[in-house]
């Protein structure tokens, strides 16, 4: 199965992401827009693994400690990958996010997971294969989100529709 570890968002935040996506839709002729429930921030893409390895990934997640912390979603960006125009929201990098990502990545690698060596570029994908009507700038009011858990997600590819199933959630609590 294909899995990855991500920050999932609460409903209020998904509404805000959906709003940003709607503005993008207004200036687009076509595109594959991520369903509202699919919005997430990937920390580590693990890829295809045997079912038996899931427990190893869960045990790595259980071994990671952090206090809940804030991230800021700061603006919309895009890149052209051949003809594929991808739009995403940029997550302002911060020490806590970077440290959490690095510790997860390193522990998974130590457990023998073969991971991509890409540099971590925190983002939330809104749409792929977008063709814009015009090149109007999209106004996006930055906002913050408190990260208090990470989720092990599985990609389920249905008939034309891809969705994500949460296999495990690691919650971070405030400690006195
Ligand atoms: P993306 O949104 O930029 O495509 C599930 O596919 C998640 O893992 C997505 O957030 C996706 O990022 C990320 N991801 C990273 N590397 C990937 C890869 N090689 N194939 C598919 N998804 C990848």
Image: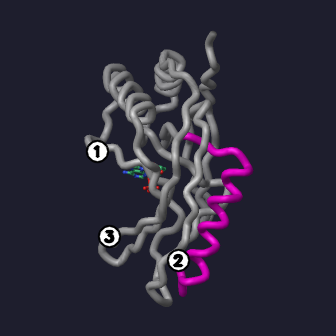
Residue 88, given in percent of the width and then of the height, sits at 47, 62
On residue 90, which mark appears? none
Q: Residue at x 63, y 10 (%)?
A: 176
Instruction: Please indicate whether residue 77 sits to the left or right of residue 168 in the image.
Output: left
Q: Which residue is mark 1?
A: 119
Residue 134, above or below 100: below
State the residue lying farthest toward the left: 117
On residue 81, which mark appears? 3
Residue 141, above or below 28: above
N-term mark: 2 or 1: 2
N-term mark: 2 or 3: 2
| Circles 2 and 1 in contact, beta carbons < 8 Å | no
Residue 170 position by quadrant: top right
Residue 150 position by quadrant: top right
SS at mark 2 in the image? strand
Magenta stretch encompasses residue 12: yes
Label 2 packing within 10 angstroms: few (<14), some (14-19), many (20+): some
Q: Residue at x 59, y 58 (%)?
A: 162
Residue 76, above or below 42: below
Label 1 packing within 10 angstroms: few (<14), some (14-19), many (20+): few
Residue 25, above or below 145: below
Q: Which residue is mark 2?
A: 31
What is the magenta range?
7-31
Q: CA distance from mark 2 to mark 1?
A: 26 Å
N-term mark: 1 or 3: 3
SS at mark 3 in the image? strand
Q: CA distance from mark 2 to mark 3?
A: 14 Å
Question: 174 or 7, which lies in front?
Answer: 174
């Amino acid at each position: 199965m294909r899995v990855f570890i991500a920050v999932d968002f609460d409903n209020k935040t998904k509404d805000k992401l959906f709003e940003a996506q709607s503005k993008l839709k207004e200036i687009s002729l076509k595109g594959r827009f991520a369903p509202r429930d699919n919005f997430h921030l990937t920390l580590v893409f693990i890829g295809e693994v045997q079912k038996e390895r899931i427990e190893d990934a869960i045990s790595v997640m259980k071994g990671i400690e952090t206090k809940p912390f804030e991230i800021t979603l700061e603006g919309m960006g895009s890149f052209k990958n051949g003809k594929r125009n991808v739009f995403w929201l940029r997550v302002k990098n911060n020490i806590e996010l970077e440290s959490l990502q690095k510790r997860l990545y390193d522990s998974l690698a130590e457990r023998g997971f073969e991971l991509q060596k890409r540099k971590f570029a925190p983002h939330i994908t809104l749409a792929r294969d977008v063709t814009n009507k015009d090149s109007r700038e999209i106004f996006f009011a930055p906002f913050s989100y408190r990260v208090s858990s990470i989720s092990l997600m599985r990609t389920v590819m249905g008939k034309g529709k891809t969705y994500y199933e949460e296999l495990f959630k690691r919650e971070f609590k405030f400690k006195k």
